[in-house]
Amino acid sequence: MFAKRSRPLASTLLAAFCSFGLLAAAPALAAGKLPHVVILATGGTIAGTGASSTTTVGYTAAKVGVDGLIAAVPELQKVAHVTGEQPLQIASENITNADWLKLSKRVNEVLARPDVDGVVITHGTDTLEETAYFLDLTVHSDKPVVIVGAMRPSTAISADGPINLYNAVILAGSKEAVGKGVLVAMNDQINAGREVTKTNTSTADTFKTPELGMLGYMQDNAPHFYRLPLRKHTSQSPFDVSHMTSLPQVDIIYGYGNDNRIALDAFVKAGSKGIIYAGVGDGSISDALKPALQEARKQGVIIVRSSRVGNGIVARNGEANDDKLDYVVSDTLNPQKARILLMLALTKTHDTKKIQQMFYTY
Ligand code: DAS
């Protein structure tokens, strides 16, 4: 269970009124039949517990199970028929390719059920953005998939998990979220799975879509959309991993002043099929690294130039002659998201022209 929250009088009265139906608790009631939302719990801070109500770092993630998460937010019952599963119980820094394959398979199975209207995935925040993009590319349904986490453990004063979970369930059961791809609902904001990224190590407003912007807000028990994702996703994506048990090994190297080829050579020797270069600036490559990347490409490793900068387009043939070197550029994908797309691309092709087109499409 989330820690017992001392419910202020006002919300107790509200709860009492709602239970007697004196107040329309949420739009869904007014609409009649409640949507069926399945919560797939995977761990993280939203399921975390700390030593005291003032512990906001140094707590233990992935302690509370899905039944405890649901029971701790009784208001969920007023906005959806909620059922839960626990496919994982991990701190998300430990997520693996096998976990992503398992989760994607389960989400597709659950959404294929005609009685299910949407899915919420509770998740650690550290790799939430990678899971969001992986599912954006491998879930083949237009039904809503909403990923949610928390930055404070359930035991903390003003824990953000309960309200984030409540909003995520409303969003996943809404008709407005249909066909918009995987969404991340935290801190009253709705972001797209492709672009959202963690921007602060510890604050509740950490998930943002810098420059390109969030899609909308969760406010007053309802989603309010102002933008649409433009890149193809979910039912328009060609990546089918349902029968896979592993994914091609793709690794990331980081560019910096006075960098060298040691990490790259080690990855290539270990058998990486693809390398994401988190380059300085517009994906610029130092003279120390250039020969190593060219040698790797000649050995068949796919090279994607991304950027450590965090915003902007990595332009093809800008800081490197990509046509001549046969490199791919990541467009606007940050290195960790570019890795997700390259892993999936390599399940279909090693043709760099086709892979480049995928980076311009998804
Ligand atoms: N370790 C972090 C994780 O599980 C905790 C969190 O922020 O959710 O991603």
Image: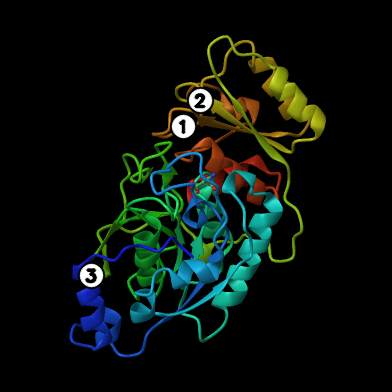
Asked if the residue at tag 1 contacts the one at tag 3, i.e. Cβ–Cβ closer than 8 Å, the answer is no
Q: CA distance from mark 1 to mark 2?
A: 6 Å
Q: Nearer the viewer, mark 3 or mark 2?
A: 3
Looking at marks 3 and 1 on the same chain, the residue that comes earlier in the sequence is marked by 3
Q: Is residue 100 above or below residue 13?
A: above
Question: Which picture quadrant has residue 148?
Answer: bottom left
Please state which amino acid type lies under the numbered disc 1: Val
Please state which amino acid type lies under the numbered disc 3: Ser
Give the class, few, some or many, for how many residues have Cα within 10 Å of label 1's Cα (few <14, many ≥20).
Answer: many
Q: CA distance from mark 3 to mark 2?
A: 52 Å
Q: Which residue is mark 3?
A: 11
Q: Is mark 2 within 8 Å of ligand 1?
A: no
Task: Name the disc covering residue 261, or none.
Answer: none
Q: Is residue 164 above or below residue 13?
A: above
Q: Nearer the viewer, mark 3 or mark 1?
A: 3
Asked if the residue at tag 2 contacts the one at tag 1, i.e. Cβ–Cβ closer than 8 Å, the answer is yes
Tell me residue 286's x, y (percent). 57, 13
Tell me residue 113's x, y (percent). 56, 83
Question: Which picture quadrant has residue 40?
Answer: bottom right
Viewer-closest of 6 and 291: 6
Looking at marks 3 and 2 on the same chain, the residue that comes earlier in the sequence is marked by 3
- Residue at x-position 26% and y-position 77%: 15
Q: Which residue is mark 2?
A: 283
Left or right, residue 283 beside residue 24: right
